[in-house]
Amino acid sequence: MTQSDKPVKPRALGRSSVRLFVAMAVVGGLAAFGTFNSIMNFPLVFGGICLALGWFDLWRNRATVRAAPWALLLLVGAALPVAGWLHQQNIVRESQARAQAQAFELLRGTEAPALVGLEPLNTDSQTLAAATSYAGPATIVAFWATWCSPCYVELEELDELHRKHRERGLSVVAITRYGDSSGPEKRRQVRESSAKFARKRAFTFPVAITAEDDLYQAFRVFGIPRTALVDGDGTIVGYAVGLDGARELMRKAEQMLRAPQSS
C-alpha cells in the first residue's frame, strides 16, 4: 500500500470544538459577572473569533467528519458570551441609573461650580472662558477621557447638538484631566494625546484639560462619562451618568432652548 492509499485519519475535531465551547462559556460567565467592564465588547469579539476558528476547522475537514453536531455546539458556545455581555449591559445600566439618581439628588438646584483651572486643547482661552461662563440659556459640561469609548459617542452627539443649537445660546465644554500623571513629560504626553483627539474630530465646542481634582469632586465625577446641564442662572438642572443618561440630558437641553425665554 502506498502512502496515498492509506485511509485518511480523522482529526480530533470534537475535542477542538469542545475546547472552544468551554472557552466561550468561561468568557460568557466572566462577562455576566462584569469582569470585562472596562472592555465591554471583548466577549462579543472573543465569541466571534472562536466561532470563526471552529467553523473554519470543520469546513477544512468536512470530508472526514459529521460537521453538524459540532457546528451546533459552536453556535451554542458563541451565544454564551453574547448572553453574558447582554446581562452585563443591563447591570451597568442599572448601576448608572442609581449613581445618576444619587448624584442628581445632591446637585439638583445647586449653584454650578465655577469652571476654573482649565487649559484649552482645541481653542483659545477667550473662547473657553466664554463657554464656561454659564452666560447662555443652557450649558452642558461633559467629563471624558481618551480611553473611554462611550465618551467618544457622547462627544460626537454633543457636537451635532452644538452645531444645531449654538445660535440659540447652547454652550458645551468637554473636560478631561491629567489624573495621576506625574512629571512634566508624562503630563505633556497626556495633554498631546487629548489635544490630538479633539483636533482630529474638529469639535465645534471647547475641549479642556485640568489638574484640579476639586472640580471633579464638586461635580461628583467618580466615573465617566458624566455630564451636567446648567441653566442661565448658573443652576444645575440636569445630571447624567453614562451614555443613555447623557442622551436624555441632551433632549432636556433642547427643550430648554426651545422654551420661550423670560425677559
Image (tube, rainbow, N blue to C red):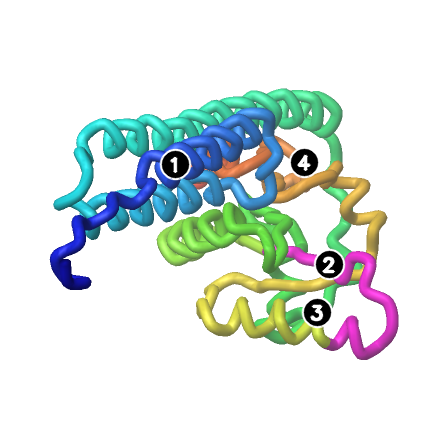
Q: Which mark is residue 217?
A: none
- Amino acid type, callout 3: Val
Say whether disc 1 or disc 3 marks the residue closer to the N-terminus.
1
Boundaries of the magenta span: 174-188
Residue 18: x and y in percent read 40, 32
**Of 237 and 188, which appears nearest the observer?**
188
Looking at the rendered structure, the secondary structure element under dot 1 is helix
Say whether disc 3 or disc 4 marks the residue closer to the N-terminus.
3
Please tell me which residue is depicted at 59% across the width and 59% down the height of the picture: 146
Of circles 2 and 3, the one toward us is 3
Q: Is residue 228 at all visible to an observer of this figure? A: yes
Q: Is residue 69 left or right of residue 234?
A: left
Tell whether position 253 is magenta. Answer: no
Looking at the rendered structure, the secondary structure element under dot 2 is strand
Task: Find disc 4 in the rendering and name its residue.
Answer: 235
Looking at the rendered structure, the secondary structure element under dot 3 is helix
